[in-house]
Amino acid sequence: MKGIGVLPVPFRMKRYFYMKLKLNDLVPGIIIRVLSFVAVIVMVFMFYFVFYKASPVLVSSGLKIFTQTGFDKQISDAFNAQNGDPAVTFGMLGLIGGTFFSTLIALVIASVLGIGATMAICEFMPAKLSIFVKAIVRLLASIPSVVFGLIGTITVVPFVEKTFVTVDMQIAYLEYFQMTGRNLLSSVIILSFMIVPTIISLSIDAVNSVPASYREVGYAFGMSHFRVIWKIVIPSALSGITAGIILGAGRGIGEAIAVSMVCGGIGYLPDFTKGFVGFLTPILPLSAAIINKSEAMSVPAVESALFTCGAILLVFSAILSVSAKLVEKQIRKVKGHDE
Amino acid sequence: MKTSKKIAALLSAAVLSLGLMSSFAFAASPIRIDIDGKTITSDTAPVVQNGTALVPVKVVSENLGAEVTWNQVKKQVTVQTAGYRVIFTINSNTYTVNGASKTLATPARIINGKTMIPLKAIAESIGAAVDYNSSSNTVTIKYFTGLTGSLKVSGSTTVQPIMQAAADKLIAQNKGLSITVAGGGSGAGIKDTINGANNVGMSSRSLTPDETSKLNPYVVADDGIAIIVNPNNPVKNLTKDQAAKIFLGEIKNWKDVGGNNAPILVQTRETGSGTLTTLEEMLLNKAKVVSTATPYTSSALLKQAVAKNENAIGFDSVGYVDSSVKALTLNGIVCNPQNIKNGAYPMSRQLYVFTKGRPAGISAKLIDYLRATTCQNEIVSKEGYVPFR
Amino acid sequence: MMNKIKNNAVYSELGYVYSWLSAGIVVSACLLIIIDIVYLGHCAISLDFLIKEPNASAINTEAGGILTPMIGTIMLTIIGTVVAFPFSLATAIYLCFYSKKGMLTKAVEFAIDVLAGVPTIVVALFALTIFTRPEFSFLSTMVDGVEGSSRAYGKSFLVCGIVMAIMILPFVIKSMQEALKAVPESYIEGSYALGATKWQTIVKIAMRAATDGLATGVILGMGRIIGDTAIVWLTLGGTLRMTGNQPWYEPQNWLSALQNTGSTLTTYIYYTSPAGEGNNYTVAFGASLILILIIILLNAITMGFNFVSKEMGKK
């Protein structure tokens, strides 16, 4: 080997082996492969395990999961069941409804706020103010959910109770449910502010990547600043904004702690045919249900039921992640066009 | 007699009598008993016979948390701790520990109508470390010290404050011991013990026959379930019938029981709560609380809910009642220790701890500690419950 | 024509109002939350608060301090980050340098993206069942002395730390992958051209160049660990104090402390909030204040990194 003659003998031996066997690369390569394999396996295994644990209830309750309500009573029956009692079928419609309504309404509010705020941050604010506001948004995104829950219980719940719940309404609806400040409305308020930062940050990226040429065209036509943004920039950035909304939805359905502190804790299906009262129903979204009922988990039936809630959440969040990815691909396609 | 001989006789008489007196005094000088560092006083003094100390049975039972039964026919006294069953027969030199026979140098006796048992024998049989210091005439017993290991306790949130306080005291005097106390409700505690997920379980309801076949329960306190309302609620008393109807959802407005025109918001416990099961048994004749009631996972949360809401009503162990809520009288009877003890209060019950199979090692010691008088007087009463002895 | 112009003007005005109003609502919500926490929590902050342990019964008004929860948070963050770091770095390196651009890589990246969206409560549920198996009993304590059963208790700092590592794995992998991808091709090509081996290139060139991005990824992970409550509540329990052999700060008791349960700032806040049993929300807000300060600090560090790397990039 060239140049190796200069080195003292032991070094020569080492060098020889390293170069011959490419030892330098072999060992780390193996380590890297092993570690990444473990990481991926663990993550995939989790997915499989949740469904495995949920299978008893999935099999025994079947489609009733999506059509029946009364989850709370079913958990208590399952917990107290003695050997030989028939298996309890679980109906999670109330829980799914709670998750669906709370996330959907929060998403609508957060999107409206988010898009407006994005426009202000990207276009209408002076640069220094924009940096400050972006930092505030990032701060809002990193506030832990338990703090949101705490603020919710101390500030939002009493506010909702004083403003919207009257004694007469309580008496009138007592046979259906107890009306307190812990209901769909409070959950929606909390969730909106937890989702908004996600939407804003992704929308900002999307809006900033709209080429300047698009705006120039608008100004050339004599459109006002706002019109340019609203009619040209936002529609071009729509895929990024949509990705943000979808990710926000993912955060919304998965939020457990903050929601469990303000939601009411009982899985009623909000009935909007009765008007605004629908917003004042106590609900129990899927993730909050897992938290609340986790103490009954020593019974296998309950454990399986909670894993079923987890499986449903897993499926929903997977669908949302996939959709977000597809939308991101859309962006790349569009961007690719311009370049 | 000569004077010197008289003096000698007097002197020897004096010496003899002094000697006799001192030997009497010596025989009558009290033996001190030190249990875990505390000197025990007993109304009946321990006696020494043939070099063995005999103590009144009460000393052992009260301070070491044992249960004593007397069989008049066989003249046997049985001392039962959580882990051991020791049977002494009066005036017999054999005794049994968990069925195995052992011999005694000095048998148990009845002295002045009180049953006295040999201290060393009983202490060693139940696993205490006994030491006798002849110069200070003290018997030192170490029963609740020198424990090491870790214990997991879970179950009823009613029993939890007692258990936690006892655990704190035990940990303070045993450096190598760790005790984890968790709540979860009586149902969860029972299931955990059956599944081997904890060492000791707590329950505020009595065990079903099915459960008793697998578990060994021990009473640790008496308790009563108080009906609680918000302090601002003008209602002070409910009849048992009214209370039942409220929790069943048949009476819905406070004005029907003498209060304001406001909805009655029932707060209850999640399933698995022993307090809830006992309430349903004793008040509702096994019917279930109305389904629109708001459930909580622990006694503390239920109490908070009632404290915060003027129109709320709930139920909790008397140990949880404090100034933030008001306990109603039931049929005019106040929920207090006397009425619970004499059974006048309609909803009195007992609190249990249990293990799977016979308790052993530190689990047994924990159970004994909970049932010993120190704990009963200092912890159980202080927390607001009723000692069961 | 004038009407149309006027309409446009009104329309634009409304649009401006809507945008500024939305931004205002979002900003004021955040500021209100911070102000609320400071206002309701500042009376709880004192030197005692930071140094003492929580009181035995948080139901009293004498609730003690937050020393053990803070230690708990720190311990968890360290365990979680230390466990996640090698695995995520290895996976990121694998995806960037070792894998062929084929279906397998795409599948792995897809799996990572999906798992980034999994709710933390599901991860906690998974952990709760897995870690009670007796094989994992070295991570928590066994329930000793119970005949006929061999279940691990399943809740301890070690278990919780590992679960946290699993939770942040997708995020840190993605972050590190982005950082490594951003290393200019020229650096890497140049390194190979000079005869360096693959491993040397990775370690000495790519990782050095991507240090800021890698560090940001790690800090992001730490931020998520600090703020998470669901996993801690289910795998560490709701006890307020360390349950290992006391006193926990003596080194011989450290292993016992790790194998037993305790609390973190987040579960402390949950426990003392009206949703938990403490019902002493002044200390809950005090602890929230401390938590927010820690998070602001981490955010600032991340922004600092971004700023520095932008400056370097400009050069």
Image (spheres, rainbow, N blue to C red):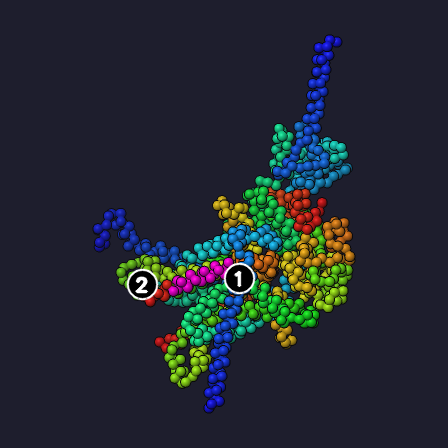
Residue at point 52%, 64% (across, down): C34
- Residue indicated by mark 1: C38
Choose mark 2 or mark 1, whichever is in front. Answer: 1
**Residue extending furthest toward the bottom:** C1
Residue A283 in view in this figure: no
Judge by depth and name the residue closer to the eye, B78 or A230: A230
On the same chain, marks 2 and 1? The answer is yes
Please tell me whether mark 1 sits on a helix, a strand or a loop: helix
Magenta region, residue range: C288-307
Q: Mark 2 falls on what kind of element?
A: helix
Is C7 above or below relative to C220?
below
Please say whether residue B173 is one of the residues in the magenta stretch. no
Seen in the image, is C19 located left or right of residue A161? left
Mark 1 surroundings: few (<14), some (14-19) or many (≥20) residues within 10 A? some
The chain letter for the residue carrying disc 2 is C
Residue underneath mark 2: C188
Measured as percent of width and height from the top left, residue B179 is found at 58, 48
Precedes in sequence: disc 2 or disc 1 = 1
Q: Residue at x 40, y 62 (%)?
A: C304
